[in-house]
């Protein structure tokens, strides 16, 4: 599947990452082989659930579902997954229907925008 998030979501997700995640994590930790080794073959719903349960470390579950989906869109972007015209849902049922290895990857980028 291509384009499961929009470019605008990834841009907004970069802002979420900067505000809530960058204190503990760098984008490069969540891109490339470390990310693929942990998450490929699993669903976006699993990753979304993990983010909601565990992040941010200082106050897990404190962000809105929308903010978690924006952070997820940013993670997809920095892992080289292409943006599309349809926004990524903040609905775990929909997200469980998308496996990370079913999304065709392009060259990853670790820039914040």
Image (tube, rainbow, N blue to C red):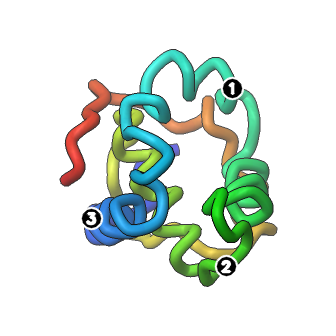
In-front residue for pair 55/13: 55
In-front residue for pair 55/4: 55
Image side of residue 95 versus residue 5, left or right: right
Question: Is residue 45 in view?
Answer: no
Please name the residue shown 67% across and 32% down the image: 39
Please name the residue shown 48% across and 35% down the image: 30
Question: Is residue 41 in view?
Answer: yes
- Residue 38 percent location from the top left of the image: 69, 26
Please name the residue shown 43% across and 53% down the image: 23
What residue is shown with label 1? 38
- Residue 86 percent location from the top left of the image: 42, 70
Q: Please tell me how crowded label 2 is: few (under 14), some (14-19), or many (20+) other residues with Cα within 10 Å.
A: some
Label ID, residue 20: none
Image side of residue 48 versus residue 7, left or right: right
Label ID, residue 62: 2
- Residue 98 percent location from the top left of the image: 67, 49
Which is in the foreground here, disc 1 or disc 2?
A: 2
Specify which label sits upstream in the sequence, 2 or 3. 3
């Amino acid at each position: 599947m291509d384009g499961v998030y929009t470019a605008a979501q990834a841009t907004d997700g970069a802002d979420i990452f900067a505000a809530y995640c960058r204190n503990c994590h760098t984008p490069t930790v969540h891109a490339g082989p470390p990310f693929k080794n942990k998450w490929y073959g699993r669903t976006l719903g699993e990753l979304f659930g993990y983010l909601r349960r565990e992040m941010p470390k200082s106050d897990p579950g404190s962000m809105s579902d929308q903010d978690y989906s924006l952070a997820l869109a940013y993670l997809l972007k920095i892992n080289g997954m292409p943006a599309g015209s349809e926004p990524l849902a903040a609905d775990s049922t929909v997200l469980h229907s998308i496996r990370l290895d079913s999304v065709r990857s392009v060259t990853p980028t670790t820039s914040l925008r």
